Image (cartoon, rainbow, N blue to C red):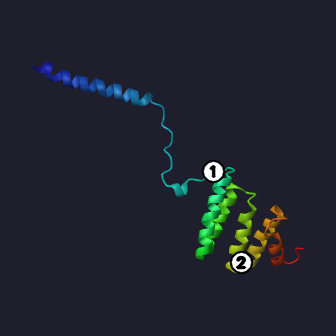
């Protein structure tokens, strides 16, 4: 009878030894992805479609009167398309509503650099001192 009782114990000991050896040989697993999306840094590449979406969302916030949120969305649009002149114009408009005229003038100046003959250029030149 004693040998029968030892057989399961021997099998378990052997399985445990094999598992431990296999565990030692396994390559280290890569670091798991970050679960909190707020901590993951977003990568931007030129994407005019995404920039246009961000601009539309910014316009929603602008019409709602939430100018800081609108400015944030317009700046997000610029990350997707740095040469997006209309985003700069709208940042200027939102900064004007917030009574931050130096920031508004800076944004409008960037609009004029990108679109010197743009649709809104004459209107913006009137708002900027010293711009013909």
Lateral position of residue 30 relative to residue 89, left or right: left
Residue 92 x %, y %: 73, 72
Label disc, if present, on residue 43 of the rendered structure: 1
Question: Dot 2, crowdedness within 10 Å: few (<14), some or many (≥20)?
Answer: some
Q: Are marks 1 and 2 in contact (CB under 8 Å)?
A: no
In space, the residues marked 1 and 2 are separated at their CA atoms by 30 Å
State the SS at label 1. Answer: loop
Lateral position of residue 10 relative to residue 102, left or right: left
Q: Earlier in the sequence, mark 1 or mark 2?
A: 1
Q: In this rendered view, identify the residue nearer to me: 30 or 101.
A: 101
Residue 9 x %, y %: 21, 25
Q: In this rendered view, identify the residue nearer to me: 61 or 102.
A: 61
Label disc, if present, on residue 122 of the rendered structure: none
Rendered residue at 65%/69% (across/down): 71
* Residue sitting farthest toward the left: 1
The residue to which callout 2 is attached is 96
Quarter of the image with the N terminus in it: top left
């Amino acid at each position: 009878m004693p040998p029968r009782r030892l057989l399961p114990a021997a099998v378990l000991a052997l399985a445990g030894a094999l598992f431990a050896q296999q565990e030692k040989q396994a390559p280290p697993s890569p670091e798991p992805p970050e679960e909190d999306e707020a901590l993951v840094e977003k990568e931007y590449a030129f994407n005019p479609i995404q920039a246009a979406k961000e601009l539309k969302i910014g316009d929603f916030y602008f019409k709602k009167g939430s100018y800081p949120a609108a400015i944030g969305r317009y700046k997000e649009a610029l990350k997707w398309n740095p040469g997006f002149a209309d985003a700069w114009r709208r940042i200027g408009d939102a900064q004007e509503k917030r009574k931050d005229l130096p920031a508004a003038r800076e944004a409008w100046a960037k609009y004029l650099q990108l679109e010197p003959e743009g649709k809104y250029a004459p209107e913006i030149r009137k708002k900027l001192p010293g711009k013909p």
